[in-house]
Image: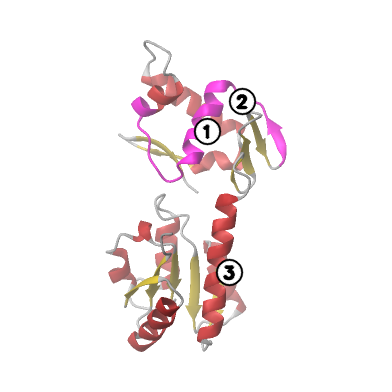
């Protein structure tokens, strides 16, 4: 079984070393970065979780988290803030960005280990629960029944729109070109114009409520689903 890989981002080198040592004892693979700038030079998409300080240099932890959450390839990576910023406003701000937990310094290593384990377990559980259901928050596809639900209300989708959504939702963060979508959703058709994909995407966005904005466009490349 592949080990979970964790990135620790903090400008306190001693603290990074302590966390790295204890996390590796627990069986994780751990890398460290002493600034957000250094962290963002790494291939962050390969990490299972990020432990992130808030008060750093030009790019603080909040700004780095926003960068990650706005990038499709890193949006789904869980983040735990570990910071001395202990006001309620700071905590709310961190969680609103999309962090999975917020731990205030000084903290015990035992507490960190427990929080890391909990967040990783929750992340895996979300991915593994009911393989017949493909979901993102309140948007779900019942694969065997070919049904789409938005906040527990069924939304009727034509077959092609359903298959496009299923494709994008299955591969969150990946960009599919129009040609790829055509080959996967219209494999039996001899000639289908690229414009057909655009029309179906527009209709799909309008039908799935607030989740329509999660279907993003990369101009010149194609479409994807931002989780």
The reply to whether the magenta stretch includes residue 178 is yes
105 lies above or below 60: below
Q: Please identify, in this view, whether the residue under mark 3 or under mark 2 is nearer the observer.
A: 3
Seen from the viewer's position, the closer of residues 210 and 104 is 104
Residue in the picture at 38% in, 23% down = 183
Label 1 – label 3 distance at C-alpha? 30 Å
Relative side of 66 to 57, left or right: right
Q: Which mark is residue 118?
A: 3
Near mark 3 (Cα within 10 A), the count class, few <14, some 14-19 or many ≥20, is: few
Seen from the viewer's position, the closer of residues 14 and 58 is 14
Residue behind mark 1: 165
One can see residue 219 in this view:
yes
The stretch in magenta equals 152-180
The answer to which of marks 3 and 2 sits earlier in the sequence is: 3
Relative side of 214 to 5, left or right: right
The spot of residue 177 in percent (x, y) is 35, 31
Residue 95 picture quarter: bottom right
The answer to which of marks 2 and 1 sits earlier in the sequence is: 2
Residue behind mark 2: 157
* Extreme residue in the right direction: 153
The spot of residue 152 in percent (x, y) is 72, 41
The spot of residue 188 in percent (x, y) is 43, 14
Whether residues under marks 2 and 1 lie with C-beta atoms below 8 angstroms apart, the answer is yes
* Extreme residue in the front direction: 1
């Amino acid at each position: 079984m592949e080990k979970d890989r964790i990135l620790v981002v903090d400008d306190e080198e001693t603290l990074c070393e302590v966390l790295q040592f204890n996390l590796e004892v627990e069986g994780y693979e751990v890398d460290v970065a002493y600034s957000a700038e250094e962290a963002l030079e790494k291939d962050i998409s390969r990490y299972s979780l990020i432990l992130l300080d808030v008060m750093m240099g030009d790019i603080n932890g909040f700004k780095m988290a926003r960068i990650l959450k706005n990038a499709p390839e890193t949006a789904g990576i869980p983040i735990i803030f570990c910071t001395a910023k202990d006001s309620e406003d700071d905590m709310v701000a961190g969680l609103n960005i999309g962090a999975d937990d917020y731990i205030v310094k000084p903290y015990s290593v035992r507490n960190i280990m427990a929080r890391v384990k909990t967040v990783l377990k929750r992340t895996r559980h979300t991915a593994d629960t009911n393989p017949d259901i493909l979901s993102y928050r309140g948007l779900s596809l019942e694969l065997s029944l070919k049904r789409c639900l938005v906040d527990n209300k069924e939304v009727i989708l034509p077959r092609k729109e359903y298959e496009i959504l299923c494709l994008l939702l299955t591969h969150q963060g990946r960009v599919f070109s129009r040609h790829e979508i055509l080959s996967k959703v219209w494999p039996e058709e001899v000639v289908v114009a690229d414009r057909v994909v655009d029309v179906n995407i527009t209709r799909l966005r309008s039908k799935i409520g607030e989740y329509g904005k999660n279907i993003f466009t990369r101009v010149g490349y194609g479409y994807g689903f931002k989780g």
